[in-house]
Image (spheres, rainbow, N blue to C red):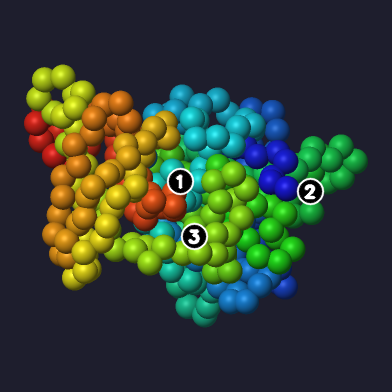
Amino acid sequence: MALQNYGVLKARPINKKIGLGNSPHYQIHMIDDTTDYRIAVNVKSKLSPSELLYVVDENFTHPLIEDLKDFKSGFTPVASKPEGIALDYIRSNLFDPRDMVPLAHNIPGPDNDLNEKIDHFVQIAINDISSSIFAFGERWGPEPHKKDDHFGYRPGNGIHDIHMNQGNVGDFIKDDGVWQDGGLLFHFPGQDRWVGIFLAFQSQAWHTDDKTGHTITHLPISDGIIRIIAAKINPEGNDTGKETVTLINTSPDSIDLNGWSIVDKNKKREILSGLELRGCETVSIKLSGSGAQLSNKGGIITLLDNNGIKIDGISYNGGDVKKQGWSVVF
């Protein structure tokens, strides 16, 4: 059963506590115009290995930012679907999963553990009154007869599951779902800057079913071998039939791409046929206009194999799109 109250909280951080103990969570006290919230961020896994995977993007760019710029404060329920602002670590191409690395929550010395990586940006946000944090996850509360365990406000209320929420194992499989992943986005308007922090457990899988979010056990042999390296998003003249996506085969072996597909942000597919990509070579795929389409305002491009399993994916913003006829390199 997927998360029951998935959404995003936009609010101001005013306090924090480092995650310690047997089940440590980094805690953030946040407020909007009327309500207090606690953001509970896992910094250690209950399953082995205990170190979480994390990535910090200090200059985060993604098409969803345009939808968040004028977002209202407070908690907003978010539908778990591709059209909108829901996060999906696999499907919305927020970052390259290969950039995630494991890190323990408590290591002696400065700025070298997961608590401190999160704390660095929370402290900046606390000191910058113009900043906001967008916390994606599942809401709990309000609990009218209970004060918060960490910061003492009433009623108890907050957001948890600030991490990947699919591809789970054991008792946590019940939380699986697509388009319901957690994460922290920091907005610093004075710097025109966004920072993204994304977390996952090492026990989670990176290929999941499109409907249930459960782990797909049959992995593609070409996983990560074929990469998207460029796209002509704004061709000269009418875009229809002129947009292209360039792929590279990083291996020395030829790979049959028959039945593979290129997918856009609206899940429209361009099916590839009769195409074999030789080892260490590139190919430019011309989009017909009836399948995947590349918006000049920003979007995502995903490559799926003939079983519908993701092989690679990128995102781009409108600012990345150069003048007509130029390719965008990823």
Q: Secondary structure at mark 3?
A: loop
Amino acid carrying mark 1 in the image: Arg
Give how far across and how far down residue 274 sits, in percent.
23, 47
Depth order, front residue of 172/144 = 172
Give the answer, above or below, for where 54 lies relative to 154. Answer: below
From the image, state whether disc 2 or disc 1 is nearer to you: 1
Based on the displayed image, in which of its 4 quarters is residue 200 positioned? bottom right
Q: Residues within 10 Å of mark 1 (few under 14, many from 20)?
A: many
Query: Vertically, is 138 above or below 83?
Result: below
* Type of amino acid under label 3: Trp
Tell me the amino acid under the disc marked 2: Asp
Mark 3 or mark 1, which has the lower sequence index?
A: 1
**Dot 2 corresponds to which residue?**
148
Residue appearing at x 84%, y 40% in the figure: 143
The residue under the point 79% across, 54% down is 149
Q: Reading the chain from its start, which is encountered first: label 3 or label 2?
A: 2
- Does residue 197 sit above or below 179 in this rendering? below
Mark 2 vs mark 1: which is more N-terminal? 1
- In this view, which residue lies farthest toward the bottom? 108
Inspect this view and state whether residue 124 appears: no
Q: Nearer the viewer, mark 3 or mark 2?
A: 3
Q: Quadrant of residue 101?
A: bottom left
Return the mark for residue 297. none
Pointer 3 residue: 206
Residues 72 and 286: in front is 286
Estimate how packed mark 3 is, as few (under 14), some (14 to 19) or many (20 or more) residues with alpha carbons within 10 Å: some
Q: What residue is shown at x 19% (from left), y 70% (from top)? A: 252
Of 29 and 139, nearer the camera is: 139
Is residue 239 among the parts visible in the rendering?
yes
Q: Secondary structure at mark 2?
A: loop
Residue for badge 1:
91
